[in-house]
Amino acid sequence: MESWIDGFVDPAGWTQWSAAEDDRKTLYYAEFDNYGPGSGTDSRVAWPGFHVMDYDEAYNFTVSYFITGDEWLASTSFPYEDGI
């Protein structure tokens, strides 16, 4: 999410690990608001488990929502951003 993707990244974005078709049916690969020369998603893989997230879906993977980090991370002095 919101990451710099350099131009050396293959436009497909992801590599098949095995020949098993079931692997691609159960995976969850998603991207949100990436930038840079390799960030285009038009040529990404066409697997059922890959998609580009919208804001609402991406929010579910933020520090504050996914690991409720805003409730405990401040006590660690570890720098973080809690939202998108």
Image (spheres, rainbow, N blue to C red):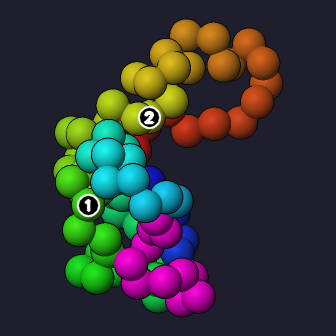
Provide the major secondary structure of the magenta segment.
Answer: loop
Residue 27, by quadrant, is: top left
x, y percentage for residue 55?
23, 47
Label 2 or label 1, whichever comes before in sequence order: 1
Residue at image location 49% in from the left, 58% down from the top: 18
Q: Which residue is mark 2?
A: 62
Is the C terminus in the top left, top right, bottom left or bottom right quadrant? top left
Q: Is residue 84 visible?
A: yes
Res 58 visible:
no
Which quadrant of the figure has residue 33? Answer: bottom left
Q: Is residue 80 above or below residue 8?
A: above
Q: Is residue 8 magenta?
A: yes
Which residue does the numbered mark 1 point to in the structure image? Answer: 47
Is the residue marked by circle 2 packed among few (<14), some (14-19), or many (20+) residues within 10 Å?
Answer: some
User: Is 47 left or right of 31, judged from the image as shown?
Assistant: left
Categorize mark 1 by other alpha carbons within 10 Å: few (<14), some (14-19), many (20+): some
